[in-house]
Amino acid sequence: MSQPLHFVPVNEFRARARTVVANPDLQKSLRGAMDFLQAKRLAQFPDDQALQRLRTLGEQIRQYSLARLPDLLVQLEAKLQANGIRVHWAATPEEANRIFIGIAQQHGARSVIKGKSMVSEEVELNHALQEVGIDALESDMGEYIVQLADEKPSHIIMPAIHKTKVEIAELFAECIPGVDYTDSVDALIQIGRKVLREKFACADIGVSGVNVMVAETGTLCLVENEGNGRMSTTVPRVHVAITGIEKVVEKLEHLPPLLSLLTRSATGQAITTYVNMISSPRQPDELDGPEEVHLILLDNGRTQAYADDQLRSTLQCIRCGACMNHCPVYTRVGGHAYGTTYPGPIGKIISPHLLGLDATYGLATASTLCGACAEVCPVKIPIPDLLIRLRTEAYTNPATASEAVRGAGSAYSSVAMALWHAWSATYRYPKLYRLFTWCATRFRFLTPRKQGGWTMNHMTMQPAARRFRDQFKKQG
């Protein structure tokens, strides 16, 4: 595998976005997939009043959980340990990978089978394991496809949404020994299943993410459709779950509303095919399950978001992907243009905490602020407000920037600030405004023909030959 993509530098985001927009096949795939997902979600919420009540409940559960996060994490750890699950804390991706590699080496592991886990993508676990000679295979079909293609997932729910069946058929024929080309979707699924099933039995360690952790019972909840998550967490002798510290709720009764919102918002299903509840390793009277269960709890900038009252709402996210499916920007440029683990609207507000605002401030400006993401977010994250806050943090003078976000002030420009102050003064003082408009009409011939992105699809903006106030005065 090649070096990890990690993230796209700010000055490359626009170039990647243009490449995607210029690709008609990819545009067709993205538009078709987004329309399909929007329609499925809409069908699951026919009663808007009921939906809004459920969203309010989901928001309250997440806010309540975050308000008590430190205490809930202590309670969760104690309960998990009492249940026989070993808990590890990681402040950074490097530390999380060291912990995982230590567990693997302790058991002499040479192969790892993975269920879907966005946090393992966040820490780039596969690359860390490869460096120490441990094979890691993705068992989620979409993740398996992008792993074969040596790519990053382009969507947090459907990683290979950017791939056509022809591209997948060519990939399988090229990368899987003994497989002939076929563009039959059913045949491709069966090919993938056959390869993966052989790996479950011989893998030394199974890896999974976690959708929700329940503090009062010490339960790890995973939802999935393919069954690979259940296979990864039961067949290998050791199960290692890795997740962010924010995924905890206090009580088991808090789980059903969140699952109802998650599955309907993500894939348009009333409930996923499998809901896995893991509370301990295999017990003496049980026939299956792992002998050991480990949980790695990752910070990686989450405490930075948690420390700020406004930015804390970023951590309410339940990773459904609905904001991506309804975002006009993501729908056009897809996930790879962002280059971050979490693309789309949620990626724009969480990536600055994971990677620093200096590396990601360009993503915060890649938004129309139309509010579609906030309208469909099942837990009511005010994404447009957070984007405005991050933009403000990025363009603030470094000398006066707050410490709320690492890299604040990194986009500051004294020239740009001078222009904005001049613009503000022009509209604040009537005499200055009248002078400006008088000059604009008399020197309109100096208007530049190219005006950034505007003139790519619109006519050049040019002041009128005469001001309205002059015309009005002439008419008496």
Image: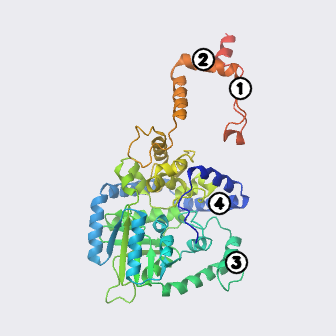
Q: Secondary structure at mark 4?
A: helix
Measuring 68% from the left and 84% from the top, which residue is drawn there? 179
Query: Reading the chain from its start, which is encountered first: label 2 or label 3?
Result: 3
Tell me, for residue 446, which label it has, or none.
Answer: 1
Marks 4 and 2 sit apart, C-alpha to C-alpha, by 49 Å
Find residue 352 and report its horizontal and vertical position in percent. 47, 52
Marks 2 and 1 sit apart, C-alpha to C-alpha, by 17 Å
Task: Estimate how packed mark 2 is, as few (under 14), some (14 to 19) or many (20 or more) residues with alpha carbons within 10 Å.
Answer: few
Q: Secondary structure at mark 1?
A: helix
Q: Secondary structure at mark 3?
A: loop
Query: Reading the chain from its start, which is encountered first: label 4 or label 2?
Result: 4
Q: Name, please, the residue furthest toward the top.
A: 476
Query: Reading the chain from its start, which is encountered first: label 1 or label 4?
Result: 4
Let me know if residue 475 appears in the view: no
Tell me, for residue 435, which label it has, or none.
Answer: 2
Measuring 38% from the left and 72% from the top, which residue is drawn there? 99
The amino acid beneath tag 2 is Leu
For residue 227, above or below residue 2:
below
Find residue 282 and report its horizontal and vertical position in percent. 35, 84
Asked where in the image residue 174 lies, by quadrant, the reply is bottom right
Tell me, for residue 30, which label it has, or none.
Answer: 4
Task: Estimate how packed mark 4 is, as few (under 14), some (14 to 19) or many (20 or more) residues with alpha carbons within 10 Å.
Answer: many
Query: Reading the chain from its start, which is encountered first: label 3 or label 4?
Result: 4
Look at discs 1 and 4 and give the one toward the viewer: 1
Find residue 29 and report its horizontal and vertical position in percent. 67, 62
Q: In the image shown, does 147 or 268 lie closer to the viewer?
A: 147
In this image, 154 relative to 101: left or right?
right
Marks 1 and 3 sit apart, C-alpha to C-alpha, by 60 Å
Query: Reading the chain from its start, which is encountered first: label 2 or label 1?
Result: 2
